[in-house]
Image (cartoon, helix red, strand yellow):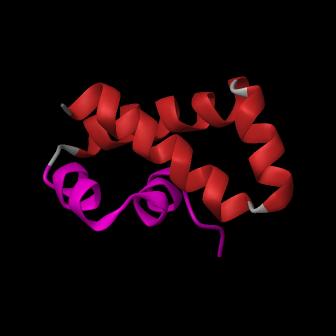
Amino acid sequence: MPIDTVERFLVALDPHHREQVQRLSHEEQVRLADAWEAELRQDTDLDTLSELSPPAAESEAAARVADKLLE
């Protein structure tokens, strides 16, 4: 069974941000997960990190999105 984007985004977040996102509506979680996917696609620095460690790149992008949109 494939894991959806919101679930992947939540896994990539640190525990503090994960708690914040889980308190949001599902629609808001989807919006953040979509922003996270866009960050992963558009940031060329993350491409390099992704080659070395895909989970680290996902985590970095998730932190960026959370910092921008939650704080």
Q: Position of residue 23 (x, y in %)?
A: 13, 53
The N terminus lies in which quarter of the figure? bottom right
Q: Position of residue 71 (x, y in %)?
A: 18, 31
* Badge count: 0
Vertical arrangement, residue 22 with respect to residue 32, above or below:
below
User: Of 50 and 32, which appears nearest the observer?
Assistant: 50
Vertical arrangement, residue 25 with respect to residue 7, above or below:
above
Vertical arrangement, residue 17 with respect to residue 30, above or below:
below
Q: Residue lying at the far left in this picture: please name it.
A: 23
Q: Position of residue 52 (x, y in %)?
A: 83, 59
Residue at horizontal 27 percent and vertical 35 percent from the top? 28
Which stretch appears magenta? 1-23
Residue at horizontal 65 percent and vertical 68 percent from the top? 2
Q: Residue lying at the far bottom in this picture: please name it.
A: 1
Would residue 51 appear left or right of 8 to someone viewing this image?
Answer: right
Q: Position of residue 3 (x, y in %)?
A: 58, 66
Vertical arrangement, residue 57 with respect to residue 33, above or below:
below
Provide the major secondary structure of the magenta segment. helix
